[in-house]
Amino acid sequence: MKSTLRLAALATVALLSVAAAKPVHKPLASAADPGSNWANQIVVTADGSHMYGNPKAEMQLREFVSYTCPHCAHFNREADPALRLTLVPKGQIGVTVTTLLRNPIDLTISMLTTCGDPKRFFVRHNAFLSGQDAWMGKLEKIGEEQQKRWYQGALPDRMKAIASDLDFYTRVAAWGMSRTQADACFANTAVFETIKKQQAAVTQFGVNSTPSFILNGKLLDAHDWPGLSKEITTQMAARHKGAI
């Protein structure tokens, strides 16, 4: 990634810097009857993260991801279908996704994925990760002079420049979001505050790389799907040891 983009991570952290708060334990939004397909149950947590699955499942997974992290895109391609087709539908696990911002592109995408109906969050989230190669590839054609627009002026204008340069307006149009609506998202202070709360959670849990995972309250050393799936299997086996 270009040098200006790497340096911009510091600017993004400064912009969104908030004091680490004590853990907030608030009830999640009410869930549907457990007899239904839990993969369709979406709730927004107290810190603004998005969760699918059973909020009362014995296994609770929290993913910390960055949209500009290639490993995150690779993880999502492997893990999302595996979880949605196995453990999640049966209510055996709840999966929470928290965005970790590394640079202004992450912030721009997070504003677009967080804005709108929460039940459609994962449609937007998966669309950006699955298409990462296409829009990240455009960075090679964008010079440092053009990137300066990303770091100067009002924040909504900076995000508009990024969205235009990386063709995000065309991408979001696929799920019915017009350019006017996307620009309104960039100016939405409530969405911005929601993303700031997620960065407070990142600090609170001591996460400093992506993807990272917390499984049942423990920050794991695993940073990919093979490692995570092994941890899930091990913990599930331990919990049901001796059961018939």
Image: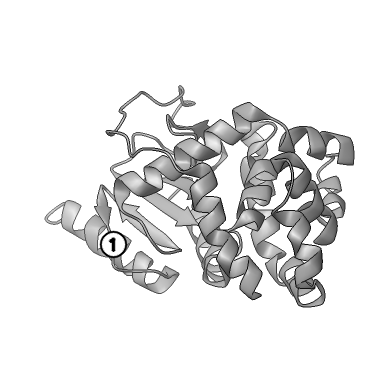
Q: Is residue 189 above or below residue 178?
A: above
In the displayed structure, 209 sits above or below 3; it is above
**Identity of the residue drawn at 43% across and 31% down:** 34
Residue found at x 64% / y 69%: 4
Q: Position of residue 222 (x, y in %)?
A: 33, 69
Query: In the visual, does 112 lie left or right of 98?
Result: right
Residue that protrudes farthest toward the left in the picture: 242
Classify 10 Å Cα crowding around label 1: few (below 14), some (14-19), many (20 and above): some
- Name the quarter where the N terminus is drawn: bottom right
State the residue at coordinates (41%, 37%): 54
Residue 73 showing in the rendered view: no
- x, y percent for residue 155: 70, 42
Q: Secondary structure at mark 1?
A: loop
* Residue 15 position in % (x across, y down): 54, 45
Tell me what residue is drawn at x 38 percent, y 60 percent. 208
Which residue is under mark 1? 220
Residue 208, can we see it?
A: yes
Q: Is residue 133 left or right of residue 42?
A: right
**Coloring scheme used:** one colour
Type of the residue with mark 1:
Leu
